[in-house]
Amino acid sequence: MPSNRYPLIAREAWAILFILLGLTVLAQFLFGPAAFIISLAILSVAVYLFRDPNRIIPSQPLAIVSPVHGIVTLIEEEAEEIRMHNKTIRVQITMRSHDVYSFRSPIEGKVMDQWSSSPNKNESRRHFDFYIRSDEGDDVVTAIRLRDIVRRFHMYLHSGERVGQGQRCGYFYFGGVIDVFIPLQSKVQVEVGQYVQSGSTVLAQIIHSEVASVIQNDNP
């Protein structure tokens, strides 16, 4: 089970930051002030890029939260999720190179399956997909396409495990493009061009048929 306890700087980048810190110290003693200032600037940029701030998870059980930081670039109704062979709503989020790189679960539930695939001749980006089923039986599939800069990621989810809504469960360097396939009976709460934050921005609210019936009866 992934843990919610982590430092403000991603552990996945500690090795890189320690190397840069060592080079900065060496630059001070071996190459003088100019090299030290340049090395310190590079270290500062790296610390900013690998930041991993805490997020406030909304207390909405049927909410689907954004798994990453980024900008909503596409909302497509009745999009087909290929592996599950059913119609969904597709919300696409494009991460910028300076966004937070941590990945969070969009819903609470059980990890049903996950897939990893290498690029083919028509697709240069590596894929990592997984899907989670909530306790109410709602399926959410998240498809990740990594950037060409660094095709490296850490995912701490395993099939059969439970994961909490907005829980940190992965990390991939320099971001990518993320497609969140959500149930058709959901009310989307974001729009194209909107900036979203992992774990805290609600992408959509799942509406169950019995809930919709109650709302309709209460508002004739």
Image (spheres, rainbow, N blue to C red):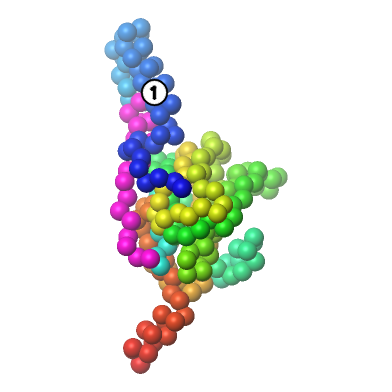
Magenta region includes residue 166 = no
Query: Is 51 a magenta residue?
Result: yes
Write the residue at 33% across / 14% down.
25
Q: Position of residue 204 (x, y in %)?
A: 42, 66
Q: Quadrant of residue 164?
A: bottom left
**Residue topped by disc 1:** 18
The residue drawn where x is 40% and y is 29% is 14
Q: Residue furthest top?
A: 30
Q: Is residue 193 left or right of residue 81?
A: left
As drawn, is 38 to the left or to the right of 186?
A: left
Up/down of 98 relative to 132, above or below = above
Residue drawn at x 63%, y 64% as measured from the top left: 84
Residue 155 higher or lower than 12, as above or below: below
Q: Quadrant of residue 219?
A: bottom left
Residue sitting at the far bottom:
220
Q: How many marks?
A: 1
- Going by the numbered disc 1, the residue's amino acid type is Phe
Residue in the picture at 47% in, 44% down: 170
> SS class of the residue under badge 1?
helix
Of 12 and 158, which appears nearest the observer?
Answer: 158
Q: Is residue 127 left or right of residue 156?
A: right
Residue 159: x percent and y percent? Answer: 56, 52
Q: Nearer the viewer, residue 145 or 171?
A: 171
Residue 37 place in picture, x, y as percent:
30, 19
Range of residues picked out in magenta: 43-61
Instruction: Label the magenta part by its dominant secondary structure.
Output: loop
Location of residue 54 in the rendering, given as x and y in whole percent from the top left corner: 31, 46
Residue 199 visible to an observer of this rendering: yes
Whether residue 180 is visible to the viewer of this picture, yes or no, is: no
Q: Please state which of residues 94 and 161 is positioned toward the viewer in this rendering.
A: 161
